[in-house]
Image (tube, helix red, strand yellow):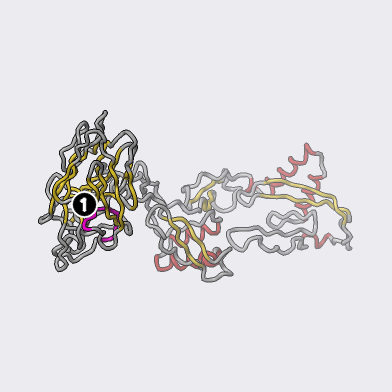
Amino acid sequence: MVQVCRQQSTMLTVVVSKVNFKLLFITTEEVSSTEDLHCENADKCAYWSDWGPCSQSCDGGTRTRTCSDSDAYVVGELGLEARRTLTTALRSPLNKRHQIIQTYITFCFPYLAYWSDWGPCSQSCDGGTRTRTCSDSDACSGSSSDSEDCNTQICPYWSDWGPCSQSCDGGTRTRTCSDSDAYVVGELGLEARRTLTTALRSPLNKRHQIIQTYITFCFPYLAYWSDWGPCSQSCDGGTRSRTCSDSDACSGSSSDSEDCNTQICPYWSAWSDWGPCSQSCDGGTRTRTCSDSNACSGSSSDSEDCNTQICPQAITWPMGTYGLLKPTTRCPNQWATGHRYHDTEDDNPFNAWSSPCHMSGPYDTTTNVYQNFCMKTVDIADTDDQSWPTGQYCIFRKGGSCPSGMTEGSVYWDNEDDDNANSYSGELPDGVYNIDTRIEFCCQTSGYTSNPIYLPMDTSFFLFKFNNECQQVHGMRATSEYFYWDTEDDDNDDEATGNHPYEGVVYSGIRLEFCYYERI
């Protein structure tokens, strides 16, 4: 006889933990069915569908299946009696439902009732084991103890960072890796960690192969990037780049860059200025010292080559006739000398000069002034083999015209009108020397003061400034100086014309600036 069991049925879902087999929850739902279910075959029907696809291709996912009979309850292979018992329980009042289900589970699945909770894991990482025990060896199937793997994630292999090498301005600190093959990419899933753990516990000849295979499969974008190129700067911040050999495999652009060498470059503020060169030409050395050994890189003293140019042979004064202001030392050999006595202002006179001032005198603030000259009066063409080099400076004119390449100018001193005592002697620059004074100058204006010129170094000398800077001369140290002549106060006619020495007419007086040169 064929009997139809039911047409209206109850959907029954019982969920048991896969970890410890404890009952988690049970739900029901009334459903209609038009399919006849013959009782004698009820315990043989297959109620579960095939498993669906996994939600992830690696690093762990989930998959699902469905039951075509809502009353089917599967914990192992349940028979018809099990389904009837649970269906009766679910149709009972709430206060009896759990009692019936628990009694049934204890009777039919005693091994679920006697196992203890899992104990602690033996390792915090890199894989350990945990155990549980059965309180009734007769009720538990097999052994009275059970174990499983736990904490399979890879342990961190890096040590803590060490101390910094500097307290400020940038230093370095280091850490060490206890296993050079440890590989961590962000937050890896359980499956990834298991794979890598297996690799790290494998013999060395297999380890790299396992890791590379896993990386290439799960992280393909890591396999196609080149190594980082060199940094564009050694300090103070640069960039380095890398390229991707397969644009389809790399996310975004096929090139990548990052900052590098961001540490501050060594600074030089603690170093003194360079000292004088030991030679004026043919190569010498100069040194400097560090006032703070912590701020300077390496030794506390430093040296470098200087004045490496070849020494000129037999330098002579340039061609032509001209004059220079006489210093307190002497004039060049075979040059003539002369002087102009300036009768300066008598009422409240205020002649002034720099300190130091190497201009030959005598002079003071309350009396008159001697202006002394060194005059080159002979032009010997076969020995004077150079012209005045380009630069920015002035000299006295002599002989009616300026040397080649120089331009003319003049300065006029309106000397004291009352009881004027002007006088002169010897060789003088071109000009007018009566109760007033006009002196003619030649100025070189076509070069730069920073480009050193070559002049004889056997004695000290003066060059007038054309602007407010001293012309640099090879092998000579320049000192900036000045003199101020307090000229006539009433109806003063002081004047400076053309290209003349700096500064010229200043208030009721003449101020000229000049540079004193002495051998280094």
Image position, residue 491 (x, y; %): 34, 36
Q: Is residue 86 above or below residue 226?
A: above
Q: Is residue 450 visible?
A: no
Q: Does residue 288 belong to the magenta stretch?
A: no
Q: Is residue 224 above or below residue 439?
A: below
Q: Which residues are magenta?
A: 389-399
Residue at 20% x, 48% y: name it: 325
Image position, residue 170 (x, y; %): 37, 46
Element carrying mark 1: loop
Q: Amino acid at mark 1?
A: Pro
Residue at 13% x, 55% y: name it: 335
Q: Badge 1 local density, few (<14 within 10 Å), some, or many (20+)?
A: many
Q: Is residue 235 left or right of residue 513?
A: right
Which quadrant of the figure has residue 412?
top left
Residue at 75% x, 42% y: name it: 100
Image position, residue 227 (x, y; %): 44, 65
Give the labeled residue for mark 1.
429
Of residues 398 and 185, the one drawn nearer to the viewer in this rendering: 398
Of residues 422 and 284, the one drawn nearer to the viewer in this rendering: 422
Of residues 488 and 27, the one drawn nearer to the viewer in this rendering: 488
Residue at 54% x, 50% y: name it: 146
Q: Is residue 64 left or right of residue 89?
A: left
Q: Is residue 499 left or right of residue 277?
A: right
Q: Is residue 11 above or below residue 319?
A: above
